[in-house]
Amino acid sequence: MPGVLPPSDFGRAKLEIETIPSGQTFGRTYWGSYPDPLGYGKSLSRFSDPRRRAATNRFGVLYLGDSLRVCFLEAVLRDRREGVVDDLPMEEVELTQRRYAEIATTAGLRLDLRGDNAVRMGVPTDVARAQRQNLARRWSVAFHEPPVSAGWDHYPSRLNGATNLAIYNRSIAKLQPKRVVTLLGAPGLAQVLEDFRLGLA
């Protein structure tokens, strides 16, 4: 099944939109070879622009999480524990070569796909739960383009249900890095490693 695509009159939907308070902090985990904690690409990702056009004409997406825990799950661990019941070794380089940034928001709008908000807006639950990446990308275009023109999307992590943000590149100017550390030096990482039974190889 291809899934339900955005209807032509989606802009008439009653959108679930909130204002993010200025100074609310989110996190991001990324490879240290990329120096900008607010850097983003346009490669395929959960809410990336799927249209076949020049890169300069496609929007980019920056992903943030509401805690170190969900950032670690989304960027590092992902599906590696599936089927593994024993301790899982990790190479130390995965922790020393990655960075963890604390990033503060300024006031702005967001589209909220948590809870039953997606259902109320007519958005398929497969989009909010990332069960169909191609479908999520098609809906992301509907969120990004007029008449909706959302600045970012507030959605649940598929790994633990925590809050994530997908920031469209036009709204990245509303973010400000507050602190950047190596992932290994991030406060709380030891507890995350213990909780998921991860050790250094």
Image (spheres, grey):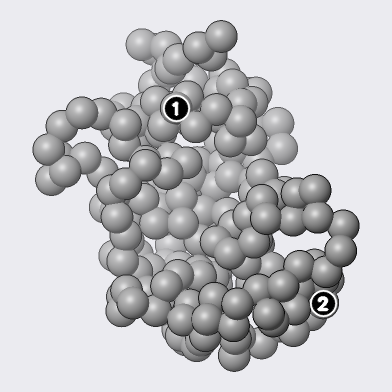
Which residue sits at x=80%, y=48%? 83
Q: Position of residue 173 (x, y in %)?
A: 29, 65
Label ID, residue 134: 1
Q: Quadrant of the N terminus?
A: top right
Q: Position of residue 187 (x, y in %)?
A: 66, 87
Q: Nearer the viewer, residue 41 or 64?
A: 41
**Is 149 left or right of 65, judged from the image as shown?**
left
The answer to whether 138 is drawn above or below residue 41 in the figure is above
Helix, strand or loop at disc 1? helix
How far apart are labels 1 and 2 at the CA level? 34 Å
Which residue sits at x=66%, y=51%? 79
Residue 174 visible here: yes
Q: Quadrant of the C terminus?
A: bottom right
Decide: few, some or many residues near mark 2? Use Cα within 10 Å; few <14, some 14-19, many ≥20: few
Q: Amino acid at mark 2?
A: Glu
The answer to whether 133 is drawn above or below residue 90 in the figure is above
Helix, strand or loop at disc 2? helix
Residues marked 1 and 2 touching at CB (< 8 Å): no
Q: Position of residue 89 (x, y in %)?
A: 72, 72
Q: Nearer the viewer, residue 136 or 177?
A: 136
Q: Quadrant of residue 107?
A: bottom left
Q: Earlier in the sequence, mark 1 or mark 2?
A: 1
The residue singled out by tag 2 in the image is 194
